[in-house]
Amino acid sequence: MRAATTTATVALEGDDVAVRIVAADLLEVRSLRHEGEELLVAAAELPASSRVHGRAAGITLLHPWANRLARDVFSFGGVRARLDAANGALGRDGNDLPIHGLSVAPGAWRWEEADATQAVARLDWPGSDPAFPFPHTLRVAFALRGARLEITTTLLPIPSGVPVPIAFGWHPYLRLPGTPRGSWRLAMPARRHLTLDGLGLPTGAHRDEPADEHPLTSRALDDGFDQLADGAWFALRDARRRIRLRLLDGYPVAQVYAPASANVVSLEPMTAPVNALVTGRGLRCVGPGERFRATFALDVRGYPGRR
């Protein structure tokens, strides 16, 4: 790959697929077009409560944690983190819980490399931030191979630092253009369905469910799953095309969000369950001198003879 320019936006081109990625205060795939049709839902098409930090959609990285936390203080490895209620980098849900991680200062994300089909973005996270006092570097590689977009996130603690808890994830807000939501079908792999309380936090209870596929119809979903195997996949399809999200490695947890009021399904790869930084449940870490890598892919298939 060649060295990237200093612009915030990178464009990738593949077989009938075009991708546009923006590295600003959040890292977001703003556009994923298949044969000229947009498969991502833009922030303006969603209510503010459904957007990442009230302003982002597309395919957005949630870092340092995905989805919500039960409180503003947590500890890991003897290091205490505290979220400041006045912190403008922090989003909150309707119950005032911290949600969707933290944004960064403009320019903190930068493109290390980019060409027509690949790009690598980098973020250096300082240990001075009390909201997440675990210094590390994050590198996100985007690769477009034909009609498949592969996203690999690598976290490297700084050599003189402390172990870093792993809780990041992604929100791909997907749609199938040209057909009504009621005709979409949602496929899910074998999974463990997590019971959530009224605040959307896992209670610790769960039930096993087999792989299945059902019409979405008018169902509303905001459900969490864990014990997902490497290679497991979720899919959204209609009579015209299929969008498949495959959890290649490092993502044993996922959330599926599909509000009845919007034409969107968010299939969300996660490295840890919701609230793992507080409960420790399902939480992993990576130590200095080590690295953690997680990869998922979105591939698009159009059906012959579709209108």
Image: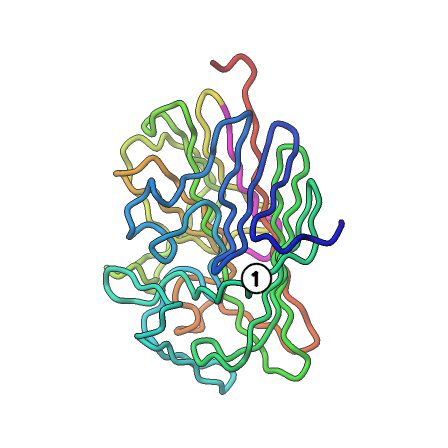
Residue, far bottom = 78
Look at the picture and state if 21 lies above or below 252.
above
Q: Nearer the viewer, residue 35 or 282?
A: 35
Q: Secondary structure at mark 1?
A: loop
Q: Where in the figure is residue 83, as x and y percent of width and height?
A: 37, 76
- The amino acid pointed to by label 1 is Trp
Q: Residue at x 73, y 54 (%)?
A: 3
Look at the picture and state if 291 lies above or below 74.
above
Query: How is the protein colored in the picture?
Result: rainbow
Residue, far right = 1
Query: Mark 1 highlights which residue?
Result: 109
Q: Where in the figure is residue 63, as x and y percent of width and height?
A: 48, 63
Secondary structure of the magenta portion, mostly?
strand
Q: Is residue 157 left or right of residue 67?
A: right
Residue, far front = 6
Q: Residue at x 35, y 63 (%)?
A: 91
Q: Label 1 crowding class (10 Å Cα cut-off): few <14, some 14-19, many 20+?
A: many
Q: Nearer the viewer, residue 63 or 124?
A: 124
Q: Nearer the viewer, residue 103 or 66?
A: 103
Q: Is residue 44 magenta?
A: no
Q: Where in the figure is residue 172, as x and y percent of width and height?
A: 46, 46
How many circles with numbers are drawn on the protein? 1
Task: Please provide the residue range marked out in magenta.
Answer: 241-252
Q: Where in the figure is residue 136, as x and y percent of width and height?
A: 60, 73
